[in-house]
Image (tube, grey):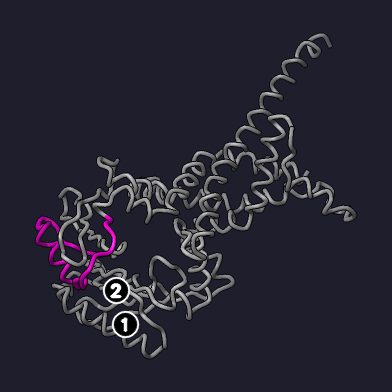
Amino acid sequence: MMRAIFVFLHRWAGLAMAAFLILVGITGSILVFLPELNHWLTPNLYPGPSGGAELSASALLRRAEELTPQARPTRIFFAAPGTAIVSFETKPGAPEIDALYLDPVSGDALGRVKQKGLPESLGDVLPFIDRLHWSLALGPWGEWLLGVVALTWTIDCFIAFYLTLPANLLRRRGFLARWKSAWLIKPGASFYRLNFDLHRASGLWLYPLLLVLAWSGVCFDLNVVYRGAMGLVFDFAPPIWKREAPPASDRREPLPFEEAERIVRDLMAERAAREGFTIDRRTNFSLDRETGLYVYGVHSSRDVGEKYGGTTIAIDGYTGAVHGFQAPTGGKGGDTATEWLLELHMANVFGLPYRILVCVAGVAIALLSITGTIIWWKKRCARRLHDKRSEPALVDG
C-alpha cells in the first residue's frame, strides 16, 4: 500500500515538473560552459585580457555615467578578464536601460545587453538563457515558481530512491543482488524496458548530484524555506546586504563612488591582514540607494568557487561606517555548507572534470523527465486498451 502511494506521488510530481526540469536541465548544461561560450559567441563583449592596468571601479562607473546620462549606475561586476558589466537604476516611468559592457583597462564601451525581454541580438542570447534557467525569464514570479519546482523535486528525489529499492525490504537475504538490476540497463530489451531502465539507472548513478542540484535550487529560488530547514541543523550569519530603507527624512546624497571605493578597499585589506586571508581580485562594487549600502566583493582564499567571489564587505553609504562582513568559509556552519552547495550547483569547483559531470547531469535531468513521461504514457495507453477489451465482457455479464 505504501509503495503504491509513493508510485502515485512520484508519477504526478514528475509529470507536473517535467517541462520545467527539461528547460532547466538543458539550459543548465549550456551555462556550465558560459565563460567559454561568451568568448566564442560574443568576442566583442568578452575579448579576454588585455595589457595595461585596470581602471578603478569608481572610474568605470563615472565612465558609465557619461555614456548613459539618462540613468544612474548602481553596480559594476567584473565578469571576466577584459570585461566589466555595469547595471543601472532607471527613473520611475523611464524605459529599462540595457547593461553596459566596458573594457576595464581603457573604459571603452564594448556593447550593451538587454536585461529583460526576448533576445534581439546575438549578445542577448546567453543572458536570456541565463534568465530562463534561474527565473524562466519571468523575474520574481518565475523564481518563486522554480523554487516550488525545486522543493517538489527535492522531496521526489527521496521518493524515487525508495522506489528503486527491492519491493520486499524485510527480506534481507539477497538484497544487493535484487537491487543490482536497478543500476543496470538490459541490452536488447524492448523499447519500454530500455526506456524504464534508462529512467531508473541514470537516476541512481547520478543520484547524489541530482539531490545537490535540487536542494540548491531551493536555496536560490525559495531561500526562506531553505534557511528554515537548514537552520534546524546549522547556524547562519545574517545577510549583510539586508537592511530596511532609512526614513525619507534621513536620506541624502550618498558618498561619492571614489570615496566609498577607497573606504571599502581599505577595510577589506585590513580585514584580510587581521584574519589571515589573501585577496586575489575584485569581483563587484555596488550602491543600493534603497537601503543606503555600498557593497564591495572580492575573490579571496576564503572562497570555495573558482570563477566568482563571495568575500564581501558592506558600509553605510552615507557615513562610511562598516555595516557587515561576510566570507564563504570560516564563519557560521550554515554559510559554509550553503557556499559549497551553491558552487557545486554552478560547477564552480573541481575544475573541468566536474564541469563535464554537471553538464551531463543537466542532460540527464531532461532525459529523466522525458523517459518518465514516456513510462506514464505507455502505462496509460495499456490501461485504456485493457479497459476497452474488458467492456464487452462486462456488458455480457
Image position of 142 with respect to 48: above or below: above
Does the CB distance between marks 2 and 1 fall below 8 Å?
yes
Residue 40 at x, y = what percent?
Answer: 33, 50
Res. 344 mark: none
Residue corresponding to mark 1? 268
Identify residue type, mark 1: Met
Please name the residue shown 36% across and 89% down the image: 273
Identify residue type, mark 2: Tyr
Please name the residue shown 75% across and 46% down the image: 182
Residue 378 at x, y = what percent?
Answer: 66, 28
Where is residue 16, by image quadrant? Answer: top right
Verify whether residue 65 appears in magenta: yes
Please name the residue shown 68% across and 30% down the image: 191
Q: Quadrant of the N terminus?
A: top right
Residue 174 at x, y = what percent?
Answer: 88, 52
Image position of 258 with respect to 348: above or below: below
Q: Counting residues from the N terminus, which is met first, the one under dot 2 or under dot 1?
A: 1
Give whichever of 262, 152 is nearer the camera.
Answer: 262
Magenta range is 46-75
Residue 68 at x, y = what percent?
Answer: 12, 57
Q: Quadrant of the C terminus?
A: top right
Within-10-Å neighbours for mark 1: few <14, some 14–19, many 20+:
many
Give whichever of 251, 301 is nearer the camera.
Answer: 301
Circle 2 SS class: strand
Disc 2 to disc 1, C-alpha distance:
8 Å
Residue corresponding to mark 2? 296
Where is residue 241, by image quadrant? Answer: bottom left
Q: Is residue 202 left or right of residue 138?
A: right
Q: As drawn, which residue projects farthest toward the top?
A: 396
Instruction: Kindly tell me whether residue 95 is visible in this rendering.
Output: yes
Where is residue 54, by image quadrant? Answer: bottom left
